[in-house]
Image (spheres, rainbow, N blue to C red):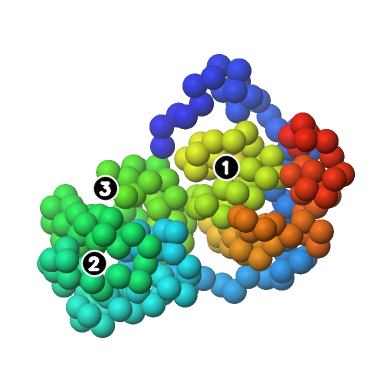
Amino acid sequence: MPELFTDPAELAQTRRPLTPEEADKLPHLHRLLLGYYGQPKPRELWDPLTQLIYSLLSSRTKTPTSHQVMRDLERTFNAGPGNWEPVRDASTTEIERAIAIVTFPEVKAPQLKQALQGITERYGSLTLDFLAKYRTEKIRAWLEQFPGVGAKTSGAVANFSTLRRRALCIDSHHLRVAQRLCLVPRADATTTEERLMRLVPETWDAAMLDEHHSLVKLHAQTLCTFADPKCGPCPLLNICPTGQRNQGELPLAAPAI
């Protein structure tokens, strides 16, 4: 992935060794969430193409709806893992009708068709299994050439699929928690992932990064919600400047942790 730090002072910060406090930020956060929510259910790993389709369609859509739309695609087009060609060959209108329950189906339908056609044109057949031989950075760059595929989606494919690479999927939930905790300066998902990955212990493998994301996302959906964060019972309150301000324990201008 390209270097995103353009501020010389910030770039210098990214190259210096972490202090012990910085090195324990994510492990401490992880321990607190694990103690509160328990071990997440292990993920069922899909092939990278199926994961790409799911990730494209699931943006801004609740998980049960996203899983239902995958079932709808399979049923409507007699398609599924290893056989997504019927979706690729369907008209945009047909795809949009099949995915109507997701948010912005009119945007996602042409994006999905273009991605499936583009993969076929560039590789010669409709599969992403060949990405397993690439470095993680190349996998993500290859995926991000298609409309609608940004850092969040490429990170999901790299980490959640059978590719199982070290990457963080920074969706809107993860971004919100990271910003409220002041873990990193406010930025978009791409830059936030770059900054958070610097805090990730070298001992964390792809499965651990997946577990961490699952816990953060669950927390965002359960307590650290967009409109009505429940800061009182939050297990992260002692390390969250935003929660402490909401509880009246900190002035408005609080330093980042």
Residue beneath label 2, please? 96
Residue beneath label 3, please? 146
| Label 1 CA crowd tier, 10 Å (few <14, some 14–19, many 20+) | some
**Quadrant location of residue 208?**
bottom right
Q: Secondary structure at mark 2?
A: helix
In the rendered view, tell whether residue 114 sits above or below residue 1. below
- Mark 2 in CB contact with mark 3 (< 8 angstroms): no
Residue beneath label 1, please? 197
Question: Which mark lies nearer to you, 3 or 1?
Answer: 3
Identity of the amino acid at label 1? Answer: Met
User: What residue is shown at x 34% (from left), y 56% (from top)?
Assistant: 132
Identity of the amino acid at label 3? Answer: Phe
In-image side of 173 versus 138 (left or right):
right
Q: Secondary structure at mark 3?
A: loop
Query: Residue 226, image x and y in percent?
Result: 61, 55
User: What residue is shown at x 52% (from left), y 52% (from top)?
Assistant: 172
Quadrant assignment for the N terminus: top left
Identity of the amino acid at label 2? Answer: Glu
Between discs 1 and 2, the one toward the N terminus:
2
